[in-house]
Image (cartoon, rainbow, N blue to C red):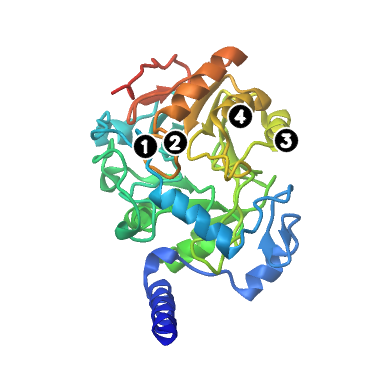
Amino acid sequence: MLLTILAIVALLIIAYLLFVSFYPSFGGDVTKELQEKYATSENYKNGEFINKKGVPEDLSIGETLSLARKFFFTKVPNGAPKQNIEVIKSDSINIANHKGDTRLIWFGHSAFLLQIAGQNILVDPMFGRVAAPHDWLGTNRFNNEMPIAIEKLPKIDAVILSHDHYDHLDYGSIKKIKQKVQRFYTPLGVGVHLEAWGIERERIFELDWWEETKLGGLKFACTPAQHFSGRKFNNSQSTLWSSWVIQSATEAIYFSGDSGYGPHFKKIGETYGPFDFAMIECGQYNKMWPDIHMFPEETAQAGVDLNARVIMPIHWGAFKLALHDWTDPVKRVTRKARELKIDLVSPQIGEHIYLEQKTTTSDWWVE
């Protein structure tokens, strides 16, 4: 019996190693040369990127198995919509020809198209069906269709990525858009995945926290977040995670990526605020991982800390990646925003959001 168990374990390990080695969605690995380069960063220690606070804590094998058991086997009432979420469809010609006021189109979760100062910026463009390395390893997204097929997107001036988790950096999506993208902006290390997928290093620009770069009339600033990284068991924390600031001559926009609540929001607000619009994560939280994802009430407070005129909850409405009711994030953050007297919008997936106009907020998620 013992030999049988050992043989099964050995086969599973071999299968995993083969899968990781030959299946492209796992991406690339940071080389020793890059590790030496990243060692100059204040956010890099002992071969890993770190948060300013000592989070997340490394879990034991027992704790990891317990967490996995709860996640995969806990029945969550209303954990996903009872039916497909209908989205507002976008016309490819309208998108390609837009030269007017700054606007955003939300694709669900944390994916956006930002049209600003005559440029098209894709943010965390996850258009895939499942937030996992393979479709068999996750559940389908809540909407069967996207507002626009990824193949119909126009030329993209820049793609901005917050970190390398599957619900933000999707191999299939990058593969489909890579020929129409001028530049990719990432936190340190994330470029290794793009290179593994055939994108030239000359088109990849990696930044550390508080570093800035310019594209045309836009400024991009890579700013802190409190999270973690990794696409497989043996490369956790090998790449950096971040939030982003996007500034034109007249407007300032903030994108949180994934982050637990912390003092970095106030510092970002003091450095780059006030913000006209802030997209802040609000979903996939749980008391078992409170330091790497915010609870909805913290999302609203982060908006106050950032000195944002309007906030929008993101990281919800597309995937079941936690154990809460799928509408819990938007309901709770809406209540807290009212209490804190900060404007909040919760547009339907695909709705055009104009910074200079009041977005109509409806309870579209109510079933």
Badge nearest the viewer, 3 or 4: 4
Query: Type of residue at label 2?
Result: His
Image x and y of residue 336, in percent = 56, 19
**Residue 324 badge:** 2
Regarding mark 2 in the picture, which secondary structure is present there? loop
**Mark nearer the N terminus (4 vs 1):** 1
Q: Say if mark 1 contacts mark 3, CB within 8 Å.
A: no
**Mark nearer the N terminus (2 vs 4):** 4
Image quarter for residue 99? top left
Badge nearest the viewer, 2 or 4: 2
**Mark nearer the N terminus (1 vs 3):** 1
Screen quadrant of the N terminus: bottom left
Image x and y of residue 357, in percent = 44, 15
Q: Callout 1: 10 Å neighbours few (<14), some, many (20+)?
A: some
For image coordinates 54% across by 47% down, the residue present is: 162
Q: Say if mark 3 contacts mark 4, CB within 8 Å.
A: no
Image quarter for residue 255? top right
Residue position marked by numbered label 3 in the rendering = 263
- The Cα atoms of the two marked residues, 3 and 4, are separated by 12 Å
Query: Type of residue at label 4?
Result: Glu
Image x and y of residue 4, in percent = 39, 84
**Residue 298 badge:** 4
Regarding mark 3 in the picture, which secondary structure is present there? loop
Query: Type of residue at label 3?
Result: Pro
**Residue 79 badge:** 1
Query: Type of residue at label 1?
Result: Gly
